[in-house]
Amino acid sequence: MKKSLLTLLLGAAVLAGCDPDKETGPSVPGSPGVYVLSEGQFGKGDGTVSAYGINSKALLTDAFGTINKEAALGDVVQDMGIAGAQGYICVNGSGKVEVVSVPDFRSVATIRRIPQPRYFAATSATRGYVTAWRGPYTNYLPGKVMVLNLSTNTVIDSITVGRCPEQLTVANGLLYVPNSYDNTVSVIDPATNKVTSTVTVAAGPQTVVADQGGNLWALCSPPYGTTGTPTLVRFAPASTAAQLSLPFATGSPAKLRIGPDKTQLYYSYNGAEYRMSTTATALPITPFIRRDFNGFAIDSRDNSIYGAVSTGYTTNGYFLHYPAGGGKAIDSVTVKVGPNGFVFY
Amino acid sequence: MALLASPAAHAQTTQPRPDTLTTRAHRLPEARVRAVRPERFAVGSQRVELDSAVLAQYRGGTAADVLGSRLGLYIKNYGPGQLATISLRGTSSQHTAVLWNGLNIALPTLGQNDLALLPISGNTQLAVQAGPAAALYGSGAVGGAILLRTEPDWRPGLRGSVQADAGSFGLRGGSLEARTASPTLAVRVAASYRQAQNDYPYYLRLPTGLARYTMQNAALRHQWSFSPDLAWRLGAAGELTAAAWLTDADREIQQGTSIAGSNAREIDQSRRLVLGYRRATTGGGQWAVRGAWFEDIINYSDQGAISNSRVRTTQGQAEYTAPLGQRASLRVGAEAQHFAALVDGYGREPITENRAAAFALLRYDPRPGLRLSANLRQAALPAGLAPLTPTVGLEWDVRQPAVFDSLAASLTLKASAARTYRAPTLNERYWRPGGNPDLLAEAGHGFEVGLRHRVGLARQLLLESELTAFTQLVDNWVQWLPLGLNGAYSPRNLRQVRSQGLEASTALRLRQGRYQAAARLAYGLTQTRKTQGVAVDTDPVGIQLAYVPLHRVNLTTDHQWRGWLASAAYTFTSFVYTDASGSDFLPSGGLLGATLGRTVALPGRTTSLTLLVQSTNLLNRTYDSYPARPAPPRAYSVSLRFNYH
């Protein structure tokens, strides 16, 4: 007791009035690198994108703030995509898309007034699309796909789709938009910016990816607060109905990804990451990596694997770097609260 | 009430005086049935009380304003008029019990109080007792208890005052108070109103540089408080008391500066009624019964998303206090509470819950200069018995001055040890999804030792100092984690948190002719860390908890001369972490507030006028009171009060 009191007093004397140093780095580590997205704590405006040099192993924790006069990136960093030499960051709670130059992360523009932006996809270096939700929880309105001119960084059009449009993909010259509060995928022709068809999948499609054969896969998980069977659905490009439906027994599968060669699907399910061939006709039973990833990506340059681990919304998370094909993690790097995705540069 | 002009008023924080009970026979205070306060059984505890003169300065404000700036307690505040919660001795907002006239007024849904919803005008007394004290105050008195009270004023005649306030950023307000008493009946009515636009400027760093904004959606649209109370002496031995406190606030909810498109708004209404009867027995004892009915409403909406809740609490208390010989008194009692909640988050059906508790409190003064107390409470909760919570306390006057030597020093050694608990809240038990009906009560225990020193430095100068060291542990600390069905967040008894520290204060009081002055310097060192957890609870062990500053310094000073009043309060808070990793933080800094007042007697000597000019953030510090919630810059208010006495 006496000793701890002394330690307490000494600690007090040392700490009196001194604030901790803020972590800063000089610049974005050189290429090859990976941007790691961290959502941050809701309401605090502390979402970040960290930049990690794959060879140097240098980390710039808050790339946007450090490079741009300590400006806060915003609330809930949801997604980032790269088109040409610019990065587009969907900042969900702040209702904006921040545009930065890549790789140095200098601010180029801020595109505001996008309601609840979710995911970004580009069809060219000058044309981008952002999914946006409308309406409050349980009373959602049909969502929008905002059409961006990436030269002027402005919204030039918007397309009404289903409720809560999520992670869209560009394939076969078309945009596929999963409507996560419905059971549909909206197909948009970027030439006209019109919905040309609507595919019925299963309840709650969250992500669509395209495989080597041009088929589309949608991972469906019933929306929060509803019941239903989570299902992985495959459909053909010109079809409006499912070609193959693979139901899950329980749980909430999420975060469907496709490998660089577009022959392997990845998703997280029941606290583990699973891998499945695009030619398989049944769900895999054995996990690929027994970790609960909140974000997952494969670097097409060396096929090494990145998994983001979120440790709740009060503590900093981290990411793990695995060699190609999985196995033992090579690296573990701490980033900010709620890491959820990777973008390579 | 010419509080400022009254020579009897001490505009300062008073430390509890060494009890003088031991110098005379140990009987209850009066043949009249004056209440025996629970504090009598809180021997050895740290307690500060704000007197009516200080409260009068904050008449337009709330408990959040007073506790933060006057006592330097750490208030986690989301903005002016917004949610404000307290952290006492490093514990969370659910670990401070708030009692009004002896009844716990924590929201049963959340198990905590928004101090910004407790206008000062509704009460005549405010005290804070630090440290675990469930035996006295029941569930939630883990870090301590805030005690609000309306005390009858038996001085005969009519007194009253009316006040109007106006200030920066659209602050408008007013209050009135009237009291009267006959030999058998004392009545008081107080009411207050406040509104504020809170459209103050703030700055944000953008990639293009610093940009100026005006705060949006942060208005206090209205805040009412109405609190009538009466005390009625029935015969020589009985007294009936009745009190009501109605509060109603309509607030826009200020979001973080980077949140887009929110227009959140919240209506908070509380209706509290209590009826009590006390009766002295011929043997010198006293029994008391109380019945109370509360209704708490919170209606929240944001962009069409609505969350409404209404809880009705019915409760009863009965207690008997008896002298045990010449040197001791014993209180035994029981209480029961019934909650009926209609909350959107619990589903369509109303939820009901019952709780009960029994307690015994003993005060024993074996010889002059030595005071002891031993208390015990056992609560029964729906999920089983709460931990048994005993308390023992000691105060020993190591040095006691002779009765007539006003300059001699007195030194008192004090110590206490207590166990405490916090009952699971209705949200923790019934929220869908995730509510956990099997949740156990949090349990805690703590020890404190200290010294109280009092010395007259000169005939008119009194110095009182107090030093307390404490250590306390909360076990089964509840944490919401994604462990429920389908990953829903669900509360679990997971953590152990240790808090230890020092509290030092020294107060100087001077009275020289018509000049009165007081100054108080207080320092608090609070180290609070999670000491044990489980793997699934990812908050690290051994790091200072978020929103618990390690150091706090508070300096207040008050001066009165003739009709003038000058008062200032400075609070320094060291940095606070804003996450559990100990990486993000709000920087350290000081805040200064000041009041200047002048009271002028009006012809006839029964009325007077008081003008008060007040400023908050006088140093114009730019800071966030919570991450992404910029606090207002320097602000002023002017109050004009008409007193009748």
Image (tube, coloured by chain):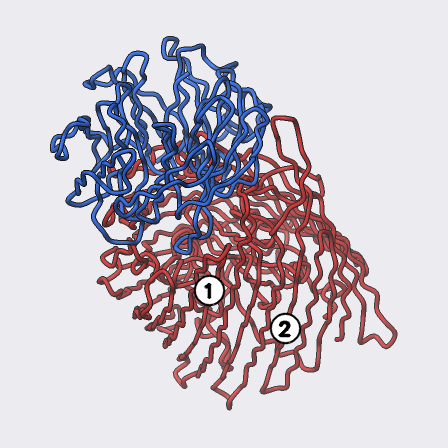
Chain colours: A blue, B red
Quick one: quadrant of the C terminus of chain B? bottom right
**Observer-nearest of A285 and B272:** A285
Q: Residue furthest bottom?
A: B235
- Distance (Cα) linking label 1 and label 2: 19 Å
Query: Could you classify mark 2 by the number of other residues whose Cα lies within 10 Å: few (under 14), some (14-19), or many (20 or more)?
Result: many
Badge 2 amino acid? Ala
For marks 1 and 2, the one nearer the N-term is 1
Q: Which residue is mark 2?
A: B190
**Observer-nearest of A196 and B319:** A196
Q: Quadrant of residue A138?
A: bottom left
Q: Is residue A188 left or right of residue A244?
A: right
Q: Position of residue B80 (x, y in %)?
A: 61, 51
Q: Closer to the camera: disc 1 or disc 2? A: 2
Callout 2: SS: strand
Query: Could you classify mark 1 by the number of other residues whose Cα lies within 10 Å: few (under 14), some (14-19), or many (20 or more)?
Result: some
Residue at position x 28%, y 54% from top? A226
Residue at position x 76%, y 75% from top? B644
The image shows residue B446, relative to residue A41, as above or below, that is below
Q: Is residue A166 left or right of residue B534?
A: right
Callout 1: SS: strand
Specify whether residue B259 is in view. yes
Q: Position of residue B385 (x, y in %)?
A: 23, 62
**Chain under label 1?**
B
Same chain, labels 1 and 2: yes
**Chain under label 2?**
B
The image shows residue A32, relative to residue B342, as above or below, that is above
Q: Which residue is mark 1?
A: B99
Q: Quadrant of residue B295?
A: bottom left
